[in-house]
Image: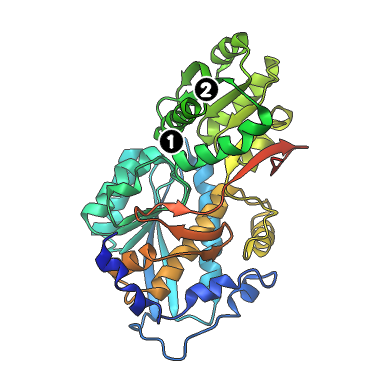
Amino acid sequence: MTDGYKRKEHIKLKSFAFIVAIAVLIIGFSACDRVSKIVQPATPQIKDKSGEISIGVVLPLTGHQASTGQLMKQGLNLALDEINSSRLSNTKLKFIIEDNTSTPEGAVAAFNKLIHEDGVSVILGPATSSVTQAAFPVAQENQVVAISPTSGARGLSAIGDFVFRVPLASNIVTLKGIEATHPKLGYQRVATMYDETDLFSTDRDTALQEAFAANGIEVLTTEIFQSGDTDFSAQLTRIKALNPDAIFISALPPEKPPILIQAHELGISVPIIMSSLTSVEVEAAGDAAEGTITFIGWLPTDDTPGNQAFVQNYSMTFGVMPNVFATASYASVYILAGAIEHAQATDAISIRDALANIKDFDTVLGKFSFDANGDALYDLKALIVKNGALQPFE
């Protein structure tokens, strides 16, 4: 972000204090409680933003990532309902949702439709890194803000100053995760396995290799597979024969449960450390997930602002506990809404500037900030599956 954007901060700090509203989300157990304790400045000095603001949403609602897209949609819609039901803000949001069919081509088409036909200033999405890599340049070229709730590969926000991401980047996750697990597990000889057709998985494996080299950890072998594969026995058998101290696996959600199940069936007993494992995949893998470790930024039991109320409301609304994809999507709407309330106007440039200046914003993920590249900064956790549930790795 340029220095010019930062010089606007002293003006924006006099804006309607939506950020303060989110800071008190931790109080109470309902959405109404979370938004009812706003502290407002005496003389807000921003343009009137009353009325409805259309927000584009691009998700994988069909195709390989459809199940993830549906969870993200639930998180987005819950936050939307909460924000719009608040009587303390004149700003109301409306979603225009497009399916990207889990493909880069679908995401590009969806972005172009939302920008050129619907005239949106902001788009939430896409989900995966491969799809985001294709779609973000469309937003940047057209000077429309895009916020991906869940794409973690490095460098995506560096595409330009109109694009932002809510997940932590792969290099941050990998370094902090190894710092948390290496001293306790003592692994010195490891194997890795990743999806060669997915940008997130390949980038995560690259980040792992760099971290291993920096820490003097030997990589015995690196096995590859592709999105949509169902048989991983050959790769896992080769890994088992080398007797590594730990196995690091980078994959998308559909492939995680079968990898864990097949590793369990082969009698692999060394620690498996898997990228972004969620409660959904843990449940799908059953007993085979026990003992699996992951690096992630959220737990249902976290005492971050509003988290317990969010978990309760999500569970009551959808009949299941939220996972990290739903949670990151939920947080993304609040981050965007905070920026809109804090901005000078509702055009893309004003919203971009407000997003760029978000620092220590209270969310269910904890204190949230964007760095100079539009990447997220917040705390990371190492988790382990115990008794069928993700718990802190200690």
Where does residue 93 sit, x and y in percent of width and height?
A: 43, 70
Of the numbered discs 2 and 1, the one sitting upstream in the chain is: 2
Residue closest to the eye, 299 or 85? 299
Amino acid on which disc 1 is placed: Phe
Residue closest to the eye, 200 or 187? 187
Q: Which mark is residue 192?
A: 2
Q: Residue at x 26, y 61 (%)?
A: 2
Q: Mark 2 packing: few (<14 Cα in 10 Å), some, or many (20+)?
A: many
From the viewer's perspective, tell me whether residue 141 is left or right of residue 89: left
**Label 2: element kind:** strand
* Quadrant of the drawing holding the N terminus: bottom left
In this rendering, does residue 94 appear at all?
A: yes
From the viewer's perspective, tell me whether residue 56 is left or right of residue 347: right
Q: Which mark is residue 200?
A: 1
Where does residue 252 sit, x and y in percent of width and height?
A: 50, 34
Residue closest to the eye, 336 or 62? 336
Q: Residue at x 72, y 31 (%)?
A: 290
Residue closest to the eye, 177 or 274? 177
Where does residue 328 sit, x and y in percent of width and height?
A: 52, 53
**Which image quadrant is residue 278 in?**
top right
Amino acid on which disc 2 is placed: Thr
From the viewer's perspective, tell me whether residue 74 is left or right of residue 153: right
